Image (tube, rainbow, N blue to C red):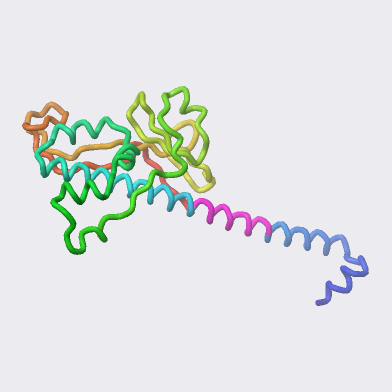
Amino acid sequence: MFLVPRWADRNLSRLELVSAWVLILILIGTFSRHMFVVFARAEQSMVERTATNLQTALKYRAGLAGMRGHYETIRQMANENPIKEIQSFHLDDLIAEAGGPKEGHVSSIPSLTIPSNYGGEVDDVELKKAKKGYWYYNTIKGTLVYIIRNNEFFVSDLQGPPRIIYRITIDYTDRNGNGEYDPGIDIYHSIGLTHVNAYKWID
């Protein structure tokens, strides 16, 4: 209250002016950091939600293939673009192939949609020019890449643009010990989308 008339009369001392500006800058800095945290958390949530949707599509398709004994299909899935698993994921087909709708079954299946920020399939050169905040499938390495937009609170072990790299992996018992999944020989357990690089979101 004491400073209000002083501001009006423009009689603040130099020390008071400096103190006022320091306080204003601190408030601006605090607010800016809070907004960066909010944006980073929103992006983290979006990335995790998309990865979960992809996991769901992969597991449902692999589950159906396993029920029919089509393990070669599962092997091929490891070399496909996981976004296409969502593109080919049709609820009606899933229900029909499972033997028709069952009570409570339909409601348990999530709604899967292609992410609006999917940038398509690219090679190594094109990936270097990729936009931040987009998903891309690297056709050369067979990996799904997300380029981080809000990187103030994101760290990883990769050089270059901050990003998360995913790959489809098959969990199986390697009975012939050759390091590859061989349908009809190895025992299939599950399929999933795993990140290749180490990373973390920080506070």
In the rendered view, does 186 fall on the left or right side of 151? left
Count of picture labels: 0
Left/right of residue 163 with respect to residue 59 in the rendered view = right
Residue 13 location (% of width, % of height) = 88, 64
- Measuring from the top left, give residue 145's x and y in whole percent: 40, 36
- Residue 6 among magenta residues: no
Q: Which residues are magenta?
A: 28-40
Q: Magenta stretch: residue 31 in it?
A: yes
Residue 124 drawn above or below residue 27 = above
Left or right of residue 11: residue 72: left
Name the residue nearer the viewer: 49 or 157.
49
Residue 138 spot, x, y in % from top left: 38, 29
The image quarter containing residue 32 is: bottom right
Res. 182 image quadrant? top left
Q: Give the main secondary structure, helix, strand or loop, of the magenta stretch.
A: helix
Query: Which residue corresponds to the image point at 68% horizontal and 57% vertical from the top-left?
Result: 28
Instruction: Tell me if residue 117 comes above or below residue 143 in the rendering.
Output: below
On screen, residue 140 versus residue 178, left or right, reads right
The residue positioned 16% from the left and 54% from the top of the image is 100
Would you place residue 18 above or below residue 201 in this image?
below
Going 53% across and 52% down the picture, which residue do you hit? 39
Residue 17 at what x, y percent from top left? 83, 61
Task: Work out which residue is located at the far bottom of the displayed protein and give it.
Answer: 1
